[in-house]
Amino acid sequence: MRLTETFHDWLLSTIDEAGVSIPHGLVLGDDDNLTVVALAVPIDQAYAFMLTEWALNRPKEIIFAIDRFTKPGQGTTLGDLVAGHHFVRDQSSRPFIVEYRHDPRIVQPIDWGNLFWNSALTLELRGAIRLLGMPK
């Protein structure tokens, strides 16, 4: 199973009436071992942790997302989503969202093409990279 599919399945199992209370990340190492990361920290620290893991250990892939709320005009329909990034070694990272609703239960597929969120997430990522003093 691809890491993105594994992440989506993991997300399905963690949504409750409060949303996704602890954001999650998955790290796929060279040995194909999967590490689950619970990001029970503020957004900037979640970015710092995942970017540091990416830079220091150079795993095959990393995917992580943070629970967010939406507003009208953001190209969404359900009001709740997780928004994050998928990193694959030797490729550009890709921002994504997954919209969801707890009751009735709806979890949409990963959306790679939301213009509003892709722009916002790219700016967040660039800001985190700059704060950490990492090369782009």
Image: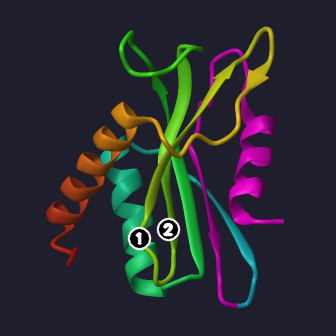
Rendered position, 131 above or below 98: below
Report crowding for label 1: few under 14, some 14 to 19, many 20 or more residues within 10 A (C-alpha): few
Nearest to N terminus: mark 1 or mark 2: 2
Q: What residue type is labelled 1?
A: Ser
Rendered position, 21 above or below 65: above
Q: What stretch is highlighted in magenta?
A: 1-30
Location of residue 63 by image quarter:
bottom right
Q: Is residue 8 magenta?
A: yes
Residue 87, percent across and down? 50, 68
Residue 9, percent across and down? 80, 46
Helix, strand or loop under label 2? strand
**Residue behind mark 1:** 92
Residue 135, percent across and down? 20, 78
Helix, strand or loop under label 1? loop
Rendered position, 38 above or below 110: below
Q: What residue type is labelled 2?
A: Phe
| Mark 1 → mark 2, Cα distance in angstroms | 7 Å
Residue found at x 50% / y 20%: 76
Rendered position, 136 above or below 17: below
Residue found at x 37% / y 73%: 52
**Residue behind mark 2:** 87
The residue most toward the bottom is: 31
